[in-house]
Image (spheres, rainbow, N blue to C red):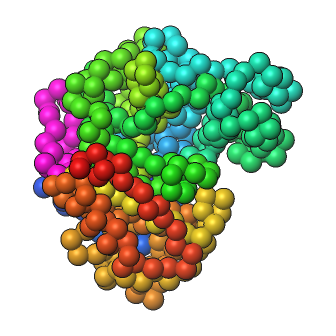
Amino acid sequence: MRVLVVGSGGREHAIVRKAAASSLVDEVHAAPGNGGIARQATCHFVSDADVSGIVELAGSIKADLTVVGPEAPLVAGMTDALEAAGFTVFGPRAEAARLEGSKGFAKEIMNAAGVPTAGFATFVEYESAMAHLATISFPTVVKADGLAAGKGVMVVEAREEAEAAIRQCFVDRAFGDAGLNVLVEECLVGHECSVLALCDGETILPLDPAQDYKRIFDGGKGPNTGGMGCYSPVPRVPAELVEEIIETVHRPTIEELKRRGIDFRGVLYAGLMLTGEGPKVLEFNVRFGDPEVQAIFPRLESDLVELMLATTAGSLGEHSLKWKDERCVSVILASAGYPESSSKGDVITGLDDDGQLEGLEVFHAGTAEKDGGFVTNGGRVLAVSALDSTFKGARDKAYAGVEKISFDGMQYRRDIAAEVVEAEG
């Protein structure tokens, strides 16, 4: 069969690699792909924002399964358009994708379903949002309601910072239309983790949890990013807690959507804070997490394509997941200026001809091919992932790989998985 993967980041490279390894798959295509993806798939220069272009491409290559990687085309209705044209698609339709496309809608669903989450207030006017700040305590969280590439969530320590964040949304229009609705939300305290689950409208099949690192600098400092590293599994989230999260978060959310006539098929990703009162939802995403899958997929023994087909067909109940008994640590390498900007065209050294390192998995995100090698082409450039029987072994391997790679302005966190290595003893 032919698989088409829509997108150009590290998540899409991870999907492409699993698809290429599937016994069901003869050809893998990507649109638009990146430098590393081009080594494993046929790339087509069609933007992942071009809905009609992707539909036309799926027809021209006779795609048997199209996987929509990023959130923006899902929210824009790419799945709806592909299905209307007769194609099998992995990824929720636009109505269901609103769980990520609108944080206000997600809160509405959670409140109706009784899903535990932070207290919040929503504002469509600058003045009322500013006035609300006099009634709350700090720290607090200011969120742009819509899609902002992982950068529309601002944790602020004092009122002055909150005022600046609200100005960013309403006055500076830093997030475009995504910031015209703003949530001011209770700041939850605890440990973050991500629980992703495949959902076919009825059956919910959780992936092993992952721990992401959002801030750009060591120690959780600096602005939020799309994610600077990850590890999986998460020792503080054992199987029984995963089951509790599925039953208190994922299932009631799917049921509430169903009550409203919305069929959710795809990945429901819950970003969670493990508080003293139990797990609470920070946000929902409706696609595979990036960089979570760069730490999850290397451990997954099951055939991902088979699972995605079962998700679209409503037959997930016939499947289970098999995992390698190993730990995975993944470190993100970002370009100069990230997350405020990115540097493009910087030559990347240290990788082999396929963009890999022996004994590691290197997932390309912001890369392009040039003169037979690779150059930077975005904010997050590469993810270096390593497997080992211990977190220490995996972490040491990942950072040893990082040390072999170089490009101008390369930045990365040096504390990924440090706490689990310490806890491991």
- Taking the spot 55% from the left edge, 63% from the top edge, the residue there is 379
- Residue 45, percent from left and from top: 49, 66
Question: Quick one: 58 or 411, which is closer to the camera?
Answer: 411
Residue at the right extreme?
Answer: 127
Q: Residue at x 43, y 18 (%)?
A: 277
Q: Is residue 201 above or below residue 260?
A: below
Residue 109 in the image: above or below residue 21: above
Q: Is residue 45 above or below residue 107?
A: below
Between 246 and 95, the one nearer to me in the picture: 246
Residue 324 visible, this angle: yes
Report the side of 108 relative to 211 (left or right).
right
Question: Is residue 2 visible in this depiction of the protein?
Answer: no
Horizontal side of 241 relative to 319 (left or right) equals right
Q: Is 318 contained in the magenta span?
A: yes
**The magenta segment:** 297-326
Which quarter of the picture shows residue 38?
A: bottom left
Q: Nearer the viewer, residue 350 or 89?
A: 350
Q: Is residue 352 left or right of residue 407?
A: left
- Percent coordinates x, y for residue 313 in the rendering: 25, 32
Q: Is residue 154 magenta?
A: no
